[in-house]
Amino acid sequence: MSKAPKSDYGKAASGQPPSGPTRGGPNVELVPVNLTVNGRARTITVESRTTLLDALRESLALTGTKKACDRGECGACTVHINGRRVLSCMTLAAMQEGKKITTIEGLEQNGMLHPLQLAFIEHDGFQCGFCTSGQIMSGVAMIEEAKAGWPSAATADPRRPFRLADLSRAEIQERMSGNLCRCACYPNIVDAVEKAVARS
Amino acid sequence: MHPFTLSRADDPAKAITAHALDPQLAFIAGGTDLIGLIKDRAALPERLLDINGLPHMAEIQALPGGGLRIGALARMSDVAADTEVRTHFPVIAEALLFAASGQLRNMASIGGNIMQRTRCAYFRDETDGRCNKRSPGSGCAARHGLNRNHAIFGWSQSCVATNPSDLAVALAAMDAIVIVRGQAGERRIPFADFHRLPGNTPERDNALDRGDLIVAIEVPANIEARASHYLKVRDRASYEFALVSAAAALAADGRSILSARLAMGGVAHKPWRLTAAERNLRGISLDDIDGLRSTIAASFVDARPLAHNAFKVELAQRVALRAMQTAGARI
């Protein structure tokens, strides 16, 4: 088995199940959810059908995570769950009991931007900025995936071990393809990721 | 979004009973297809049962003798990164890596992947209304509509959709087994029997019934898997469903093919094995391009293209050939 970024997907949930739901009409059910968001324990009440994206923006006022397609097609809503990049529009907030969520607001440490945030500024990796938080959240986790030796569709032979030194521009393009940029800043985004990899 | 209640399963037997008794209940794992179906109103479950907490269903195990057992709750990215999978079944790793995006692969489960519903635009469009898969008896808008992305094999007047899973194509080529637990216990469904052709009941994608839970997929050892490859051709370079794809695997004596496995995606309602070609490839040299091409062509004599997808007949043969050649280079 290869070393992989930490995840507890598929394993038994460690937290207690939320206490009993409150009914608010046909199948409209309010449920409390305990989760850690950007290092802080939070309890929110959401509808069962509320996506993680809507919960972050509307219950927690973390509007850095953007709602664009809301169909898992654009990557603008990318956040980390237990360190892995996911699309927050395609998962339910009520399924995140006990999970650690990181959003763009949680990347800076002690007032210092994350190296990939700095690299986006240096390389002008955006124009309108709407996709940027998703691009950066995706890029940060993607670099960890590459460090863990994960191959991609750009890897010529998945049978061979993958090393960070193999992370070419073609590899970065492929691994970032889940994040669309309407302003087409792609070359600068790849530059920024490349720079962050070199500094890491 | 359509409202539903959500509860969590901690015991497979109870989950199976709940699913069998309640036709308005759906299991949810990764949710990457189901949430989209609910948003598009192509699925309107009243109750969701979160199965992510079911024990021992996310494991990837090497089996004695060289096979694999992949838990239904294993995530696509974990399976694609697994050394055992990459080394011994590169076609499976590649089929996973060419699908979706990094974010979706971190979320989507293996059981859900082979359950995903068609990307036919008429099926996904809640405003059209003519789709026998979405609403049995309402007709098929794609049959005489825009059908460039649709089937060239096995379609019916009721449905011309294709199956969107890349992984399923690789698993079909490997003769994988879907291990299903139902109310009557566990059963093993050969991959060729898992997905259905549309016939008159296109609303049914696969062989599962109420109360069935996919627990794992078993991939038996075979001599071809090590030299295998998945090739996917699409309108965009990445993050797109296949126009046509091929899973190829072969064993050879020098350059002479001993045995071959070939399955295609994007051409039918289920992964399409090129059984005639597989039989006849034996003994042909990997250097005999014309021989390979004409042998593959034998599996396309019964292709029935629609108004806008005749190009797939030629494209699929070229994709199959190139996949065979790349697999051959891995011997």
Image: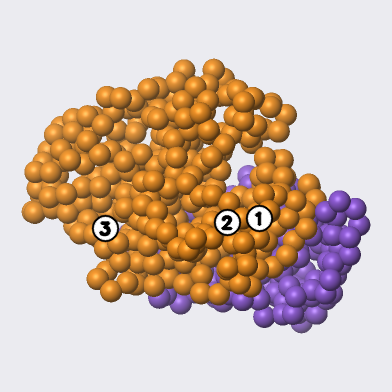
The chain letter under disc 1 is B
Query: At label 2, which amino acid type do we have?
Result: Gly
Query: At label 3, which amino acid type do we have?
Result: Ala
Picture disc at residue A23: none
Gap in angstroms between the C-alphas marked 3 and 2: 33 Å
SS class, disc 2: loop
Q: Residue at x 39, y 42 (%)?
A: B271
Query: At label 1, which amino acid type do we have?
Result: Leu
- Relative vertical location of residue B201 with respect to residue A88 in this rendering, above or below: above
Q: Select label 3 or label 2 by which is in front.
A: 2
SS class, disc 1: helix
Gap in angstroms between the C-alphas marked 1 and 2: 8 Å
**Residue density around tag 1, few if under 14, some if 14–19, many if 20 or more, within 10 Å:** few
Instruction: Supply the letter of whichever chain is orange.
Output: B
- Relative vertical location of residue A97 with respect to residue B193 in this rendering, above or below: below
Q: Residue at x 54, y 40 (%)?
A: B204
Instruction: Supply the letter of whichever chain is purple.
Output: A
The chain letter under disc 2 is B
Q: Which residue is mark 1?
A: B21
Percent position of residue A159, x then y: 32, 64
Q: Are marks 3 and 1 on the same chain?
A: yes
Compare marks 3 and 1 and give the one earlier in the sequence: 1
Q: Select label 3 or label 1 by which is in front.
A: 1
Percent position of residue B250, x then y: 21, 51
Picture disc at residue B211: 2
Q: Residue at x 67, y 40 (%)?
A: B42
